Image (cartoon, rainbow, N blue to C red):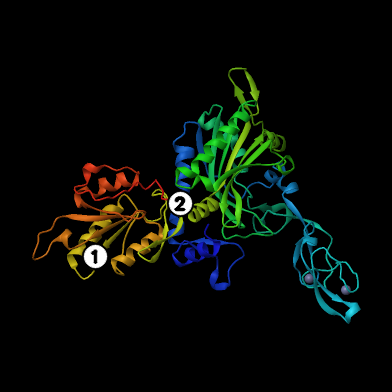
Amino acid sequence: MVDMDKIVSLSKRRGFIFQSSEIYGGTGSCWDYGPLGVELKSNVKRAWWRDSVQSRFDMVGLDSSILMHPRVWQASGHLDHFSDPMVDCRACKKRFRSDKIEETEWVHYCEATKGNKFIVPAGEPCKHCGAKRTLCPACGKGELTEPRQFNLMFKTFMGPVEEDAAVAYLRPETAQGIFVNFDNVLQSMRMKLPFGIAQIGKSFRNEITPGNFTFRSREFEQMEIEFFVMPGTDEEWHQKWLDERFAWYPKYGMRKENLRLREHEKDELAHYAKRTADIEYLFPMGWSELEGVANRTDFDLRQHAQFSGKALEYFDEESKRQVVPYVIEPSAGADRATLAFLVDAYREEEVKGEKRVVLNFHPELAPIKIAVLPLLKKNDRIVETAKKIMSDLRKRWHAVYDDTASIGRLYRRQDEVGTPFCVTVDVQTVGDDQSPADGKVTIRDRDTMGQVRVSVDNLEAVMADLMAGQWNSRKIDASPPFRSMPTNRQP
Ligand SMILES: [Zn+2]
Ligand SMILES: [Zn+2]
């Protein structure tokens, strides 16, 4: 397993992910996706959207606003439940979770030893004077405030006046935007149970301890489905969604041995949940949540009906009665999925005594699909032909042109950002004084490093097959051992 430092360093060096506001020293746990990162993350989101919404008959999409009516968060329980007890130091202003404060070592100025400074281990008294910690554990001098509930929601103000009436929150989850639109979608789209509403969007949580690169940050993007079902069929649907979502990640090349399912214990369940299971990925810091799949029962629709005074029900034709649907929620993180795909794709290999770093992304997810490379950048006909091929391919795929190094280095650079295929234009392609042009280019496969020559006229058709993981040998004139099945990973 690759360590996180390597991923962070590659991400910065090759334009995947940068620290936010880096020139000002960075913003705590906020991240910017660079030119390749934004392509990767968009591809992850696009694959999710196509599979979850566009290719299903029982799902529709939604894009609700980040700022919502403040009552939403009363109804959802976030105002009451979404908080940690915090204490502040009156001197150094540091903030601590009061239920975790005995779990850190503490600074102590001991009067029994003329005020010498000691660092005392977590939860222990001073071995000189026997005193227990009462002051701030960080500075050892400040008094601590009484514990206050610190809500994880970001608070802001709507309108020009900062007064309580205009308090608003940045949403801590996209789910509530779906629940409050339940009736709008039901009526406008004439939906029948079971059906789902899916949404991708930003959410915000003022985490006290963010970290592990983009894994836990204060601003993040969710990919959520609320799937409404008849009460009584909820447990069966929950299992279906767990299976469906568990199979989704390997579909895009994630290794199955790095995925597992973890059932929530009863005391760990959220206040609304009947059952929750997490899909976990083996990140460099250990098994951690990639996606949660929860049975939220009818809690949310009932709460919003009660707080808004509007019925959120479904008329069941069969039993001729109104029902409040149950909801199954597969809730995935776009940033976490992107990070997991990045970590999972990372390989270091030795090729002819040299280290090769490869990201073997599935072609659907790769930020760049094809790099067109001239063998000789001083040969005008080669360069012109390569640029022409690139712009033709660009109509269909994200292709780039690069002539800033020797061919070997150009290949390595593309390997390191996970470009599945390189197309090389050489003297034979365009011809010279000695020999006529053969009109063929070399396709080089990232994973096997195998090469094959293909006529330029056939290039697009061959590429389409390769991207789809197919191999049609009739389109290839010569067939050296070019084992390119991009969806079949090398171990
Ligand atoms: Zn302090
Ligand atoms: Zn002491």
Instruction: Say which residue appears at 67% left-offset and 52% top-offset.
Output: 168
Instruction: Say which residue appears at 50% left-offset and 34% top-offset.
Output: 59
The quarter of the picture showing ligand 2 = bottom right
**Relative to 144, does residue 281 appear above or below in the rendering?**
above
Whole-number angstrom distance, CA of label 1 to CA of label 2: 32 Å
Q: Nearer the viewer, mark 1 or mark 2?
A: 1
Residue 413 position, x and y percent, is: 37, 64
- Residue bearing the label numbered 1: 375
**Relative to 81, does residue 146 appear above or below in the rendering?**
below
- As drawn, the residue found furthest toward the bottom would be 114
Of residue 50 and residue 292, the one placed in the foreground of this image is: 292
Residue 144 position, x and y percent, is: 83, 66
Q: Earlier in the sequence, mark 1 or mark 2?
A: 2
Tag of residue 42: 2
Instruction: Say which residue appears at 63% left-offset and 53% top-offset.
Output: 170
Residue 324 position, x and y percent, is: 65, 28
Instruction: Say which residue appears at 72% left-offset and 35% top-offset.
Output: 306
Query: Given the image, on which type of amino acid does mark 2 rest?
Result: Ser
SS state under label 1: loop
Query: Given the image, on which type of amino acid does mark 1 rest?
Result: Leu
**Relative to 260, does residue 368 appear above or below in the rendering?**
below
- The image quarter containing residue 398 is bottom left
Label 1: how many Cα within 10 Å (few below 14, some 14–19, many 20+): many
Mark 1 lies within 8 Å of ligand 1 (Cβ measured):
no
